Image: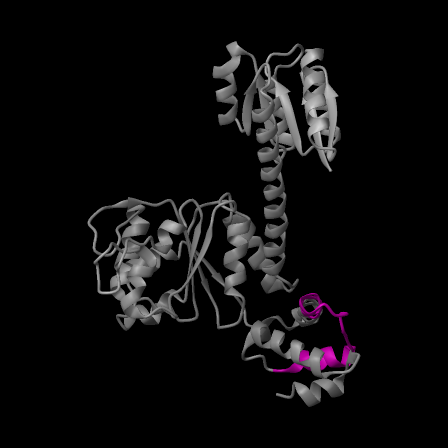
Amino acid sequence: MSKILVIEDEAAIRRVLVKILTEENEQYEVEQAEDGAKGLDMIKKNDYDLALCDIKMPKMDGVEVLQEARKIKPETPFIMISGHGDLDTAVNTMRLGAFDYISKPPDLNRLLTTVRNALDRKELVVENRILKKKVSKRYEMIGESGEISKIKDMIDKVAPTDARVLITGANGTGKELVAHWIHEKSSRSAGPFIEVNCAAIPTELIESELFGHVKGAFTSAVKDRAGKFEAANKGTIFLDEVGDMSLSAQAKVLRALQESKISRVGSDKDIKVDVRVVAATNKNLQEEIEKGNFREDLYHRLAVILIKVPSLNDRRDDIPMLIEHFADQIASEQGSIQKKFSKKAITLLQSYDWTGNIRELRNVVERLIILGGKEVTEDDVQLFASK
């Protein structure tokens, strides 16, 4: 059932709106407020799927109600009700965040169409918020060891800025999680997070992948195509395994960082981009610079903030928490009951040499859940996870 609030000082208009809405759909629950101050108070105390709000009212006008409501319940869509002389103001309210406006006297079809569209949008906003929470949980950083606590503190300080970050560490340590956390905690979190695995893209295609191309730029370029930098506009681009990028692509990335501009392959036209760059590598870039494989000037552009992710062997105290987290995650994915690990099983797993880091531990936990008993024991670990 959709809960709708009508804020209107004219009793006759209020009755008409309530009648139209309740007769249109029995799933609409409609409440009323006779002035702006009461309407705002009701919004503070209740959750509404939609508010219809008159512009000219005593005590508090509709523009003030909209502005205050956006601060406390930003997800609630507003449809403004305007008299003939309020049209300019009504249009302005859309710049302030209103979904739409309708004129007095309300046209039946326009009113109902606008209400349905506003409710559909509210539903999408809620679904996106739930999805975002799931994504955030997926990329949650598990652990309370000193090393992980330092990284979390660093992320809290760095994320609100637009500073570029270079994340280093061995394969499987969780560099991608750090990148996601930086984005999620930044002012760009509503924008896109675009991942590029520089090691997985052939050298001859990396520039096209990053910067796009125009039709005819090369044999298979049958139409214009935007690149990852354009896709990440107003958000974050994550250059994973940046140490594997070709020197020519490095030069273009450097220009993008210096000038906030890119050009598609085969084009001289500059395209402005507003992108935060987070990069990661498992290589020692200082050694790559000495070998001539990586540009020193690009390194200094990327490494404004350096975050080194420790190996799992350097944070063994986190292994019990990680095991519990993975067991819960796997049970949720498989729709099964979460299996417990005995203390001896956990102690034995803590003693192993985790060359594959977090990624390897998750694989082992999944194997033990599938092959082990009702409770995963030390014997199960020796049988199925022997190193």
- How are the residues colored? one colour
Q: Quadrant of the N terminus?
A: top right
Q: Quadrant of the C terminus?
A: bottom right
> Does 208 sit left or right of 305 as displayed?
left
**358 within the magenta span:** no
Question: Looking at the image, which residue is at 70% across and 80% down?
Answer: 370
Residue 305 drawn above or below residue 377? above
Q: Along the line of sight, which residue is nearer the eye, 360 or 309?
A: 360
Q: Magenta residues: mostly which secondary structure?
A: helix
The answer to whether residue 254 shows anywhere in this view is yes
Q: Along the line of sight, which residue is nearer the eye, 86 or 274?
A: 86
Q: Along the line of sight, which residue is nearer the eye, 29 or 307?
A: 29
Question: Looking at the image, which residue is at 61% across and 23% down?
Answer: 108
> Does 372 sit left or right of 258 as displayed?
right
Q: Position of residue 342 (x, y in %)?
A: 78, 78
Q: Position of residue 198 (x, y in %)?
A: 37, 66
**First to last magenta residue range:** 327-352
The quarter holding residue 337 reads bottom right
The answer to whether residue 296 shows anywhere in this view is no
Question: Looking at the image, which residue is at 53% across and 69% down?
Answer: 173
Residue 46 drawn above or below residue 127? above
The quarter holding residue 31 reads top right
The quarter holding residue 123 reads top right
Q: Position of residue 56 (x, y in %)?
A: 60, 12
Residue 334 drawn above or below residue 95? below
Question: Looking at the image, which residue is at 29% across and 55% down?
Answer: 254
Q: Along the line of sight, which residue is nearer the eye, 223 or 156?
A: 223
Q: Position of residue 274 (x, y in %)?
A: 38, 44
